[in-house]
Image (tube, rainbow, N blue to C red):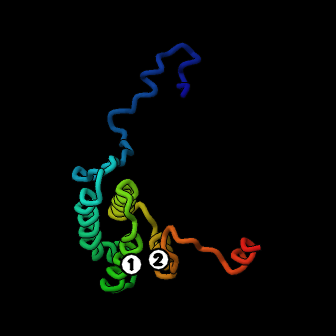
């Protein structure tokens, strides 16, 4: 980035440095937030991480309902979380489980920090309720199955 005073020969370091009273817009995760991206060797190593994510998500649901005015009962929100976790019970690769856990932690942190809009959350909840296909399952329509058979 070229500073305004660089062309005139003045020191650009002074121009790029924020003033003492200027507020900094730096967003950092909470001090206790730890996101691991390493790969576990076995499914037994991933189990505590997934359980911890599930517990943390369930604990945050009442606050989520307050923050975003979702107009849903806690039971409905718990059902959505259970359904989402249940979708991935058949995943047996520890690397994929770690990736899903990381994405879940990231999603939960975004909800806690209120970086998501109410419409995004409602879309996720409605999409979750309407989703019928298991992840990884072939989702071909009748037309395509006839096309592939020919």
* Nearer to me, 5 or 45: 45
Q: Tag on residue 128?
A: 2
1 shown above or below 27: above
Quadrant containing the N terminus in the rendered view: top right
Residue 64 pos. (x, y %): 33, 73
Q: Choose between 37 and 58: the one closer to the eye.
A: 37
Asked if residue 64 lies left or right of residue 7, the reply is left
Label 2 sits on a secondary structure element that is helix
Question: Compared with residue 110, is residue 1 higher up or lower down, i.e. above or below?
Answer: above
In the figure, residue 85 lies in which quadrant? bottom left
Q: Quadrant of the C terminus?
A: bottom right
Residue 106 visible within the image: no
Quickly name the residue at label 1.
Answer: 83
Q: Position of residue 95 (x, y in %)?
A: 38, 53
* Residue placed most toward the observer, 135 or 24: 135
Q: Mark 1 or mark 2, which has the lower sequence index?
A: 1
Q: Is residue 142 above or below residue 59?
A: below
Q: Residue furthest right?
A: 150
């Amino acid at each position: 980035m070229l500073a305004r005073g660089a062309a005139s020969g003045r020191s650009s370091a002074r121009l790029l440095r924020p003033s003492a009273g200027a507020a900094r817009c730096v967003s950092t995760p909470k001090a206790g937030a730890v996101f691991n991206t390493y790969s576990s060797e076995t499914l037994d190593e991933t189990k505590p991480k997934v359980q911890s994510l599930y517990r943390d998500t369930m604990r945050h649901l009442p606050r989520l309902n307050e923050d975003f005015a979702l107009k849903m009962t806690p039971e409905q929100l718990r059902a959505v979380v259970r359904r989402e976790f249940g979708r991935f019970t058949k995943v047996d690769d520890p690397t994929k489980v770690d990736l899903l856990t990381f994405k879940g932690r990231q999603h939960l942190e975004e909800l806690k920090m209120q970086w998501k809009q109410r419409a995004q959350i409602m879309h996720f909840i409605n999409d979750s309720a309407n989703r019928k296909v298991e992840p990884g399952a072939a989702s071909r329509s009748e037309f395509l199955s006839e096309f592939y058979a020919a």
